[in-house]
Each structure stands twice: as structure tokens, then as C-alpha cells.
């Protein structure tokens, strides 16, 4: 389904990179140490390679579906029922991530900067930003990403580079860390790290063509892999095992290390700004896509009336967990177990079904030029 | 309508930006600069807090006079409590400003606490709390930490935090103390490849400084505790200043590195000292090393910057040759596991400039220079070899962290854990080699003999 909004590759890349790499500011480097110990960096390389292979496969399957997102393809593959089922699965994932991430980011902000503020007050700020962003629509969100994400990347790289003098190569020994199961077994489930790639499968109506889709995917994966690996390597090198297992905000801990003389220290203030910017953009994207998927799943005409209810749901659900430890536990367990399946297996199944039906002639193949809407449904605008 | 909504939203966001819940005015806070932790008499701990008095900082030169500067720009309180946070809460009951630890430069534990292994419970707080800095210095005081802090009277620095920052980096040009930051200490406590060390500090036994310190204590300390009592509590401190480790090393006269903190023979310059290091086996202090031990530690770990080092003249044992020594490159460290026992190889490359040759012998010539290079290399080789052997056989503590290299001999963490490095370290053997290259002779290319009515003589 085509859209009347089409944005460039960089906007889409920035969106995907931020949604993948926002976890760097949470506990991603620590979770690598948790799985594989001193070999956390090998684990990162391992599941990144698998992700590239899976994306290669998915983009091959996608080749015949120009400017159609996952829900369009679900409809092509199994009709309205499959569209609704797929939409609900994706919606559940987005609502879960939105809820957990909103609470986690707010709790982290409370720990590092706003210790006396009530959690609802901190969450309220993020919720307002999410709602405003969703009101402005996808165009506003991606354009904001295009401007802010390079700054977030620069700030992150600055922290990582500044922490390099604190790195000790011997902290990576023994080379295989927790062994084969830690790297390969647990590493496979860490494919969920790249689960925000799911947003890319919802973006085709807003991207020019299939070539752009592939380019956006590969470039975003490449940049994300570089940042994920860089953050894991620097963290593992700077903090020895098992101390590295203790900190749930590894990049914040790296920023706290930086101390060049009396005037150049306490760079965690840079982290706080970067962290808040990444969080706000990430949460904005989640809310928009949740509303977008709901609207598309049930073929609604407008998305703006859904903004307040969805914001209220995410905000309220976010307040349910008793404490931060529960939130981290939920995020780790649920996301690791299920998200990789929704991101990689679901699209492969849907694309395969759609291709089978296209070959058998029971479903139309969509290769039409931009601007034509073969399904007859309202155009994607992301604005209404 | 849209604009009105946007304006309302904007204004409501602006209200939030004032941070009403978390506002902290700088002049509402009292910044703790140093923390002293002793065993308490009426409770578990005696916590000494030295905090800045900002109103005295802006007054110009007044604070610099004599030893009084430190006492004016900082104040000290001591509280007996069952934990550090409890002590802070109690202190906040009688201070007008809220105590803030985000500018703490040093945490000093008494030797008594350290030797009983009671440091660990307080490390957790320091690691968990957002206020403590990872770069905060961890020190062990020979004698009460309270006395050490009360003896600190910066003469040259008006800003007390600058005093701590500069003095904690003096190892870079003396080599007689070490850099022991909280994060390193903490991670070494948890590590199975390296054991922790801390800077060794003490209240000075110099009588003039001590008298001054006692006066200062009475002025600042309402909770009591005198220096005499403090010295009585010091577990292993010598009675007189000037006690050195030279005799044990077979030297007739002590060198600068042959002292432990508190024993430096001096008068004036404040009543607190730092020299040497405290050796830990896990959370328990098991020994202390003098200034030379600290230098060997720095050389073996690659943390040595430069220092002026005296050693015996190869041709005249009564006189000294002084070199400004630098580490040419990081030490090459290698560990082999042979027959289940660790074999440690350490290669140290040094370079030096000649600072003084008391004998006046012309070591500067290309023919004689190798004599000096060989003699100095041999001196370092012997002291480092002895130092490493003592860490293994006496302290049973791998403070130089050779276990970090030893991990390379194993493929997985489980294999490494099963080897139990810290237990095996006591059986380690060391192969130390030191190379010395003398680069520059200072401003003199050769020495001419002094002359007198009796003829020529060496200086």
C-alpha cells in the first residue's frame, strides 16, 4: 500500500538505528557479559552475522512486494484474518516494548538524575513527548530522527572513545568466556536485539522503492552492528569480569570513568542528555507504530483519535510493575524469548505464504507505481 | 485553536523544566571532600567527614597562612554510627546544609578496620551510590583515619579539593606511592586474577606537626579524640619518626623509598603523610610495603611515570648516583603454567637521564656509560625480583595482577576458575629482566675534579 508521505533513506536509517541502538543506553553491553562473559563481543558478532543472513533472506522474499508492509503482505498471504492476527501479534509486541521501555527509561532517569521526582512525573514527560510526536505524525518523527540521531551517535562515540584509555586487553581473557553455549546458544536468542528491524517491515509504503528498502536495511544494520559491538567491546575492556555484571547502565558507567584532569570530568551529564534524546525518539516511534498497526489492522481511517487512549494505556501499564528489577527481568526474559520470532520468523512465514498465493494466482502481485492504491484502502498518510 | 493548545503544552512543559522535585542549590549543600572511617567506640564506626567551607574560599590570601589555611577552608566533624549513611544523617541533624558526597576525593580506612577485613561492607555503598566517584582515592591509614584527616593542612593550595587531587597524583613524579582509585580497588576485590592495593597514609609523627595537629583537632573536633590516643591505637606504627626499612634491606643509610607513611623524618609541611601501599588479600589487609615497594609495584604494573631514583655508585658504595628514570614502554608480562605452577616472565624497559653523580666519576663517556646502565638495571632487577617474591611467598597476594595474563592460558572462564589462581600464586616463580638506557647527561657532559691546596680531588 503506497503512502502520500515518502521520505528519504537517511530518515529511515536514522529511525531504525535509534530503535536498535537505544538498548545500548540500557543494559545491552551488560547482557552480553551475562551470557558469554569475557566473550560477549564474540556473541555480538555471532548474532549480527545471523541477522544479516536473515535480513538477506527476508529482503529476497520481499523483492516481489514493492512498497507493501507486513500487514499488506499478511493480507495477501492469508486474507483479512491473517492480517488481523499478524497485526495483533505486532501490536502486542509494540505495546509491551512501549510499556517496558517507558518505565525502564524513566526509572533510569530517576536513578541517575531525578532521584526525588515521582516516577509518574518522569514517565509523564516521556508520555507527553510520545503523544506530541504521534500527533505530528511519521514525517515529523523521522525528520526529527534524521537530525537528532547523528548527534546521539556522535555523543555515544565520544563517550566510547574517551573511555578507551581505561581499557585493558586482558579483560577479554579467557577468549571463549562462558563457553560455547553462552556464545552460540544464548547468542541465538539475542537476535531479539535487532527486533526493531520490524519497523523497517512496516516502512515500505513510506520508502521509495525496493532498492531503498534493502539499502536502508543493510546500512541501518551495519551502523547498528558497529555501535553495538563498539559499546560491548569498550565496556568489556574497561570493566573487568565479574564487576561488569553489576552495572545495569553500562554506558553511564563508562561516562563516569572519564576523567582527564581537573576540568574534563563528570561526562555523565552528556550521557543524560543523549539518553533522554534517544529515549524520547525511541518511545515516539513505538507509540506511532503501535497506533499505525492498530489503525491498519482494523482498517481505520484516522490515527489521531487513537493517540490519547494508546498513550494512556502505555503510561498506565508502565506503572504496573512493582520495581525496576521486575521491569528488567520482564524485558530480558520476554524480549529474548519471543521478539526474534516476531521480527524474523513471522515475516518469513507471511512472505512465503504471500509468494505461494501469488504464484498460484490467488492473490494479486503488487508491483504498481507509487500513487496507485490497488487495495482501494485509504492511503497511508501517518498524518490524520 | 491549535496554537492555543500548543502554547498551553509549551508552558506546561516549561513548568516541569524547573525541576521542582530535584532542585539542588549549590549553596544549600555541604560538599564532603574526605571521608575517614575508623572502628567506633560506642558504635560500629567512627566516621570523620571533612567538608568544604565555601564562604572561606573567596576571601583571598587569608586562608593560605601557615597551617591554618586548611582548617579555615574546611571543617571536620566526627560521628559514631553503625554505617556511613547513618553517620551522614546524624551529621545532617546539626549542620545547616545537606552533606553531599559527589565531590569526595578520598576515603581513608583505618588499618585496624582493614586488617580485620571490615572494609568490604562499605564498598557496596560506594559502588551503588551515584554520589561516590569511581576516581575517588582509597587509602589505608596507619593509625586512626580521623587523625590523618585532621593533620591535613594544605599550605600551598587554597582549594582543598585541589590539594587532594594533586597529592593523589604525586606518584607520577615520586614513584613512592600509588594511584588507588575506588573503581580499581572495588573490581580487584571481586576479581580472581588480581588483589587490591591502597595508598598507605598516616598522621605524621613529627612533633611540631603533631602539636599543631592536636591544636587543630581541639579547634575542629567537638567529639573528642586526641592525637596521643590515636597513636596509642595505631597497631604497627613506630614510636619515633625516622624508622625505616633500610636496615632490613642491608643499607647503611635509608633512601627516600625506605619509609612507610608516618615514619618520614621531617618537620613542618602538615601533619599527614603518604608513602607506600597497603596489600590486601580479598577484603583483608595482609601487609604494607614502603616507598620502594610502591615503586616496584608501579614498574611491574606499567603505572610508573618518572621519578628521581638514587642508588649506590658502582665504584664507590658510600656515594650515590641519581637518575631521573622513566618507563620506556609498558612492561612485557607473560605467564606460563608449567607443571601446574605459574611461571611469570616480566621484562621492564627503562630509560633515564643522569641527575647527579656524587663521585664525579665520568660515567657519561661511551666507554663508562654501560657500567652505569648495567648497575642501575641490576639494582631494579633485584628489587623487583624481591618485591614480587614477597608478594607471592609472604603476602600470597597477586597485587600486580599477573592473573590477568594467566587467563590467556585458559579457553573458558570455568577452566580459569577451576585453576584457582589466587591459591596457586604463592608457588609462582619469577623471571625478571630489566634493561636500562641512559639517554641524556643533564647539562654536564663530563665532570672535572675539584681542586684545593692539597691538589685535585673528586667532588
Image (cartoon, grey):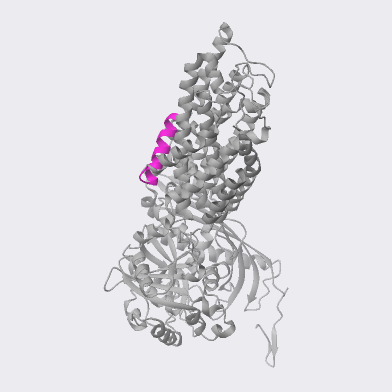
Q: Nearer the viewer, residue B334 or A329?
A: A329
Total marks drawn? 0
Residue extending furthest toward the left: B42
Could you say where residue B283 lies in the image, as x and y percent from the top left?
36, 59
Is residue B107 visible in the rendered structure shown here? yes
Q: Quadrant of the C terminus of chain A?
A: top right
On the question of residue B396 being in view, the answer is: no
Q: Is residue A366 left or right of residue A243?
A: right
What residue is shown at x 66% (from left), y 30% (from top)? A5
Q: Nearer the viewer, residue A124 or B298?
A: A124
How far across and down, in percent of the image, does residue B144 sit?
36, 74
Within the magenta stretch, is there residue A325?
Answer: yes
Q: Tell me which segment is drawn in magenta.
A: A321-339
**Quadrant (top left/top right/bottom left/bottom right) for the N terminus of chain A:** top right
Please state the horizontal and vertical placement of residue B88, each as a whole percent of the image. 37, 68
Q: Relative to the observer, which residue lies in front, B234 or A77?
A: A77
- Image coordinates of residue A96 in percent, x first then y, are 44, 35
Amino acid at each position: 500500500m503506497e503512502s502520500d508521505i515518502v521520505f528519504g533513506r537517511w530518515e529511515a536509517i536514522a529511525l531504525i538505528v535509534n530503535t536498535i541502538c537505544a538498548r545500548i543506553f540500557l543494559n545491552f553491553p551488560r547482557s552480553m557479559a551475562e551470557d558469554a562473559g569475557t566473550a560477549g563481543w564474540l556473541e555480538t558478532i555471532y548474532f549480527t552475522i545471523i541477522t544479516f543472513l536473515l535480513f538477506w533472506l527476508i529482503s529476497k522474499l520481499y523483492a516481489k512486494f514493492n512498497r507493501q508492509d507486513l500487514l499488506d503482505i499478511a493480507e495477501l498471504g492469508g486474507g483479512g484474518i491473517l492480517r488481523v492476527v499478524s497485526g495483533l501479534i505486532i501490536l502486542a509486541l509494540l505495546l509491551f516494548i512501549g510499556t517496558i521501555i517507558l518505565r525502564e527509561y524513566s526509572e533510569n532517569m530517576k536513578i541517575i538524575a531525578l532521584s526525588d521526582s515521582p516516577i509518574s512525573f518522569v514517565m509523564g514527560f516521556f508520555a507527553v513527548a510520545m503523544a506530541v510526536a504521534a500527533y505530528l505524525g511519521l514525517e515529523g518523527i523521522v525528520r526529527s530522527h534524521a537530525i537528532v540521531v547523528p548527534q546521539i551517535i556522535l555523543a555515544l562515540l565520544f563517550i566510547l572513545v574517551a573511555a578507551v584509555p581505561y581499557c585493558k586487553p586482558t579483560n577479554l581473557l579467557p577468549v571463549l568466556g562462558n563457553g560455547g553455549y553462552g556464545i552460540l546458544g544464548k547468542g541465538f536468542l539475542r537476535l531479539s536485539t535487532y527486533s526493531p528491524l520490524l519497523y523497517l517491515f512496516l516502512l515500505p509504503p513510506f520508502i521509495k522503492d525496493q532498492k531503498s528498502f534493502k539499502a536502508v536495511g543493510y546500512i541501518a544494520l551495519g551502523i547498528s552492528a558497529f555501535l553495538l559491538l563498539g559499546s560491548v567491546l569498550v565496556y568489556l575492556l574497561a570493566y573487568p569480569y565479574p564487576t561488569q555484571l553489576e552495572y545495569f547502565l553500562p554506558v553511564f558507567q563508562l561516562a563516569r570513568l572519564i576523567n582527564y584532569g581537573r576540568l574534563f570530568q563528570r561526562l555523565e551529564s552528556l550521557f543524560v542528555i543523549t539518553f533522554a534524546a534517544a529515549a524520547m525518539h525511541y518511545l515516539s516511534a513505538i507509540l506511532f507504530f503501535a497506533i499505525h498497526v492498530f489503525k491498519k489492522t482494523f482498517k481505520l481511517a484516522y490515527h489521531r483519535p487513537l493517540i490519547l487512549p494508546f498513550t494512556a494505556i502505555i503510561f498506565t501499564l508502565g506503572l504496573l510493575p512493582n520495581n525496576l528489577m521486575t521491569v528488567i527481568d520482564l524485558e530480558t526474559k520476554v524480549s529474548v524469548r519471543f521478539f526474534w520470532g516476531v521480527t524474523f520468523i513471522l515475516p518469513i512465514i507471511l512472505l512465503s505464504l504471500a509468494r505461494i498465493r501469488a504464484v498460484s494466482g490467488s492473490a494479486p502481485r503488487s508491483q504498481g507505481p507509487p500513487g496507485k492504491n490497488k487495495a482501494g484502502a485509504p492511503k497511508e498518510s501517518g498524518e490524520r | 485553536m491549535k496554537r492555543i493548545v500548543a502554547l498551553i503544552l509549551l508552558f506546561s512543559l516549561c513548568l516541569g523544566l524547573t525541576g521542582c522535585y530535584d532542585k539542588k542549590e549549590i549553596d544549600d549543600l555541604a560538599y564532603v571532600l574526605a571521608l575517614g572511617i575508623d572502628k567506633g567506640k560506642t558504635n560500629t564506626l567512627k566516621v570523620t567527614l571533612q567538608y568544604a567551607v565555601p564562604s572561606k574560599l573567596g576571601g583571598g590570601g587569608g586562608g593560605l597562612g601557615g597551617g591554618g589555611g586548611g582548617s579555615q577552608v574546611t571543617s571536620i566533624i566526627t560521628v559514631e554510627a553503625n554505617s556511613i549513611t547513618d553517620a551522614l544523617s546524624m551529621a545532617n541533624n546539626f549542620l545547616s546544609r545537606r552533606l553531599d558526597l559527589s565531590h569526595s576525593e578520598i576515603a581513608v580506612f583505618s588499618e585496624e578496620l582493614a586488617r580485620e577485613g571490615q572494609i568490604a561492607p562499605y564498598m557496596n555503598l560506594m559502588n551503588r551510590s551515584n554520589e561516590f566517584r569511581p576516581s575517588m582515592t582509597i587509602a589505608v591509614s596507619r593509625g586512626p583515619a580521623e587523625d590523618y584527616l585532621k593533620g591535613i593542612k594544605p599550605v600551598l593550595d587554597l582549594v582543598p579539593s585541589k590539594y587532594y587531587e594533586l597529592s593523589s597524583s604525586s606518584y607520577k613524579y615520586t614513584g613512592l606511592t600509588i594511584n588507588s582509585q575506588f573503581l580499581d580497588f572495588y573490581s580487584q576485590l571481586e576479581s580472581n586474577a588480581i588483589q587490591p592495593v591502597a595508598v598507605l597514609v598516616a598522621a605524621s609523627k613529627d612533633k611540631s606537626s603533631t602539636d599543631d595537629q592536636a591544636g587543630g583537632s581541639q579547634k575542629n573536633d567537638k567529639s573528642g579524640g586526641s592525637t596521643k590516643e590515636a597513636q596509642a591505637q595505631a597497631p604497627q606504627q613506630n614510636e619515633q619518626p625516622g624508622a625505616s626499612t633500610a636496615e632490613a634491606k642491608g643499607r647503611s643509610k635509608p633512601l627516600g623509598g625506605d619509609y612507610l607513611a608516618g615514619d618520614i623524618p621531617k618537620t613542618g609541611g602538615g601533619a599527614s603523610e603518604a608513602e607506600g601501599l597497603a596489600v590486601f588479600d580479598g577484603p583483608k589487609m595482609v601487609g604494607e610495603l614502603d616507598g620502594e615497594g610502591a615503586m616496584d609495584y608501579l614498574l611491574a604494573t606499567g603505572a610508573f611515570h618518572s621519578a628521581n631514583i638514587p642508588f649506590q655508585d658502582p665504584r664507590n658504595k658510600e656515594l650515590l648516583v641519581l637518575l631521573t628514570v622513566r618507563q620506556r614502554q609498558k612492561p612485557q608480562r607473560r605467564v606460563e603454567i608449567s607443571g601446574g605452577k605459574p611461571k611469570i616472565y616480566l621484562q621492564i624497559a627503562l630509560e633515564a637521564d643522569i641527575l647527579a653523580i656524587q663521585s664525579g666519576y665520568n660515567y657519561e663517556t661511551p666507554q663508562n656509560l654501560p657500567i652505569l646502565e648495567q648497575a642501575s638495571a641490576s639494582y631494579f632487577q633485584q628489587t623487583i625480583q624481591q618485591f614480587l617474591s614477597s608478594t607471592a611467598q609472604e603476602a600470597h597476594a597477586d597485587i600486580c595482577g599477573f592473573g590477568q595474563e594467566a587467563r590467556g592460558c585458559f579457553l573458558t572462564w570455568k577452566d580459569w576458575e577451576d585453576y584457582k589462581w589466587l591459591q596457586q600464586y604463592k608457588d609462582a616463580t619469577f623471571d625478571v629482566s630489566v634493561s636500562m638506557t641512559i639517554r641524556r647527561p643533564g647539562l654536564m657532559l663530563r665532570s672535572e675534579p675539584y681542586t684545593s691546596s692539597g691538589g685535585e680531588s673528586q667532588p
